[in-house]
Image: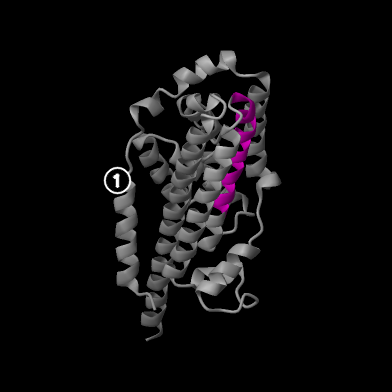
Amino acid sequence: MENREMLLEALKEIEKWEQDQKDLWFWEKLGGIPFALLDRITPNIVHEWLGKILDELGGYIQTGGQYLISDKEIITQLAKEAQLRPDYLALDKVPALPLHTMDKVAEELKESRKQFATMQGATTGFGGVFTLAIDIPALLGLSLKVLQEMALSYGYNPKDKHERIFIVKCLQFASSDFVGKQAIIKELAAAETAQVGESISKLEGWREVIFTYRDNYGWKKLFQLVPVVGIIFGAYINRSTIDEVAEAGQMLYRKRRVLEKLARMDSDDGLAKYNL
């Protein structure tokens, strides 16, 4: 059974991870420059996809759209790891599971999605600029999928609008520089104490995510424009992108769960003292 000391130790690990977040590489900060050059040589279909996913990201926040996933697979994995019958465990019971069970499932999912992203990037990199139009929305979809899986692993429901906003902020966190990441950490902490409506108001700068996401493709995807050669770059870029996104989601959701477990322990202790 987990105790306060174990949870506090986990919280220290997460806070250390937050402080250890590195700034973007110099060439990543230059992402917007080559993207401006790519604008002139990229077929209109790529631009159309970029505009489309901006709209789709807004749709995801509002309704979940085509990206909303089922919780069945994740619940089954959690039940198996906790040695419970799948029909016994429901999403509302996940918060009671030990943190290490959640961590194990989240880690397995992260590794699985990294492998999938590698194959996806290699496949779309084969055709160079012509398949780049397919790769951009596909990678966005996979990013949203893995973040929803991280949410479910720690007992949060991505069908809730509040969680979808949190997921988009995780996406933004993964592609931000050090200053931006620290600002998002503070923003998310403040949002947790606010009402859902207030949170939506505070986090309505979600459109920044897609522009940052787009600019990051500038330099990273430059070498993927060459057919066949793009296989190597596409595989590496997609794998590293999903690794960063999944890790951000895993750690930020893990932090929320740890803090809620500690708060619950404090509440139980208070009730016990009151009853005495």
Q: Quick one: 93 or 66, which is closer to the camera?
A: 66
Q: Eyeballing the image, is 4 above or below 55?
A: below
- Three-letter code for the amino acid on which mark 1 is drawn: Asp
Magenta: main secondary structure: helix
Q: Is residue 143 left or right of residue 263?
A: right
- Residue found 60% across the figure and 69% down from its top: 76
Q: Position of residue 162 (x, y in %)?
A: 58, 50
Residue 96, horizontal then vertical, whole percent: 50, 73
Please say whether residue 134 is one of the residues in the magenta stretch: yes
Q: Which residues are magenta?
A: 129-148
Question: Where is residue 215 shown, x and y percent of the image?
Answer: 49, 26
Residue occupying the far front of the picture: 228
Q: Is residue 84 magenta?
A: no
**Residue at the (45%, 59%) spot, across then down:** 107
Of residues 104 and 160, the one drawn nearer to the viewer in this rendering: 104
Q: Secondary structure at mark 1?
A: loop
